[in-house]
Image: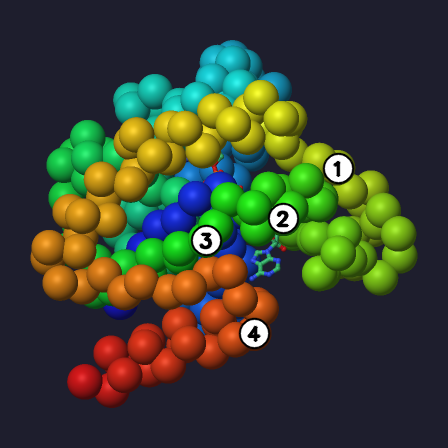
Amino acid sequence: MKILFLGKAGSGKGTYSEMLSREFKIPKFNSGDILRDEIKKGTELGKEISSYIDKGNLAPIDIILKLINKYLSDIENFILDGFPRNLEQVKLFKTNFDVIFYLKCSDIIILRRLVNRRICPKCNKSYNLITIPPKKEGLCDVCGSRLVKRIDETKEAIKKRLEIYEKETLPLINYYGKKGNLIEINGDREINIVYNEIKSYLKKLINK
Ligand code: AP5
Ligand code: MG
């Protein structure tokens, strides 16, 4: 099973790919996490990546393909979040997805989610100060590390990410929509309601 999540920053791609991965035991890959892990290593490559993603710009295609292929080269089943992200990446990656979940969200909801998101710098677990707060204020439930804001969560970088989404990623909705395996989900709703809808589509596909 090959699953792709599409949607704006803050639409819930990471949230639902994590939930599905855990319940259906399918490995998930988030290109943003893969890039941020490289930055954490402090390598020259990490510094180069940081100069793009800190400002909300896309990382260069050669870097992204090299990193993604390292993880996906011999895996049959996966959930992808954040890749492919534009038509150029679709053409170079050449994968037929069984299903693409498009999480459609309104900007006002997205902005509220992004300003309240905190992540664990060690295990990448994501929190939201309003909807999914950590049990102990400021600390990760899993590993106890101090939670931080994401490097691209400044006002300017969020604006840039949303602009790039409109220009580069939105055309994929049309592209996959024409292929007939794209499912549009209203992502503005409560997490469990959205997740149950995604799950019911997936179960139907699995039992086909
Ligand atoms: P990436 O890490 O993929 O970020 P993004 O696309 O901007 O999306 P987010 O992670 O911000 O949002 P999400 O949809 O995962 O939402 P989440 O579930 O976390 O990419 C970051 C950067 O890396 C890019 O800008 C680019 O520079 C680079 N990059 C990545 N891939 C690339 C590629 N292929 N090519 C080139 N460059 C690439 O939810 C957000 C918050 O909202 C959380 O706090 C969550 O708890 C909360 N939340 C979610 N859903 C709900 C809900 N229904 N109700 C209440 N709260 C909710
Ligand atoms: Mg994410």
User: In this picture, is 83 found above or below 193?
Assistant: above
User: What's the residue type where badge 1 is placed?
Assistant: Val
Disc tally is 4
Q: CA distance from mark 1 to mark 4?
A: 25 Å
Q: Which mark is residue 42?
A: none
Q: Verify CB contact (< 8 Å) between mark 3 and mark 4.
A: no
Q: Earlier in the sequence, mark 2 or mark 3?
A: 3
Q: Which residue is mark 4?
A: 192
- Identify the residue under disc 1: 148
SS for tag 4? helix
Q: Is mark 2 within 8 Å of ligand 1?
A: yes
Residue wearing tag 3: 105
The CA span between labels 2 and 4 is 16 Å
Displayed quadrant of residue 116: top right
In the rendered image, the quadrant that contains the N terminus is bottom left
C-alpha span from label 3 to label 4: 16 Å
